[in-house]
Image (spheres, grey):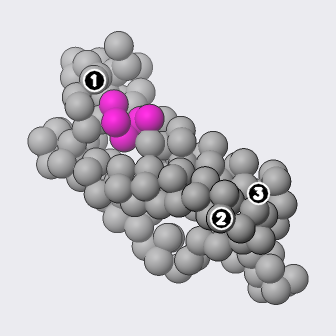
């Protein structure tokens, strides 16, 4: 079973990967006129800042609030990030993406985070941990 510290570390890596993707997308949009994906960059960055606040709750031993915070995270990152990307792809192909790699990276990053957020929501981690 995953320790809480390890889970929080992996969730932080998910947030960093997502923020990196969004910043690269912003830079690409500003330089070429085409973002990596259809994601709304500024609101998505704001969501990840809020997500980092939820992770802080877990770090500061407010485990109940941290787990409750995983509900909107699952809806936003699992629903919008995984399901939304896949549905967009089935509806319009790669029209909303800079290419297959941009699509796959978006789905993989959000899929990784969704699995971690499910683990957090359902308390599938040990609290007395040593990392």
Identify the secondary structure beneath mark 3: helix
Seen at 43% across and 55% down, the residue is 79
The magenta region covers 115-119
The residue wearing badge 2 is: 91
Rendering quarter of residue 54: bottom left
Residue 10 visible in the current orientation: yes
- Circle 1 residues within 10 Å: few <14, some 14–19, many ≥20: some
Seen at 64% across and 73% down, the residue is 38
Q: Which of marks 1 and 2 precedes in the sequence?
A: 2
- Circle 3 residues within 10 Å: few <14, some 14–19, many ≥20: some
Characterize the magenta stretch by its predominant secondary structure: helix
110 left or right of 119 in image: right
- Residue 27 percent across, percent down from the top left: 76, 76
Identify the secondary structure beneath mark 1: loop
117 in the magenta segment: yes
Location of residue 67 with respect to 87 vertically, above or below: above
């Amino acid at each position: 079973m995953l320790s809480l510290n390890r889970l929080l570390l992996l969730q932080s890596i998910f947030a960093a990967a997502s923020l990196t993707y969004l910043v690269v997308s912003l830079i690409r949009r500003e330089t070429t006129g085409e973002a990596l994906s259809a994601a709304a960059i500024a609101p998505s960055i704001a969501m990840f800042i809020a997500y980092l606040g939820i992770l802080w709750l877990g770090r500061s031993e407010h485990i109940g609030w941290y787990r409750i915070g995983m509900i909107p995270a699952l809806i936003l990152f699992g629903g919008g990030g995984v399901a939304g990307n896949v549905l967009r792809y089935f509806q319009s192909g790669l029209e909303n993406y800079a290419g297959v790699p941009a699509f796959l990276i978006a789905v993989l990053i959000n899929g990784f985070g969704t699995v971690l957020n499910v683990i957090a929501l359902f308390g599938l981690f040990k609290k007395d941990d040593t990392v």
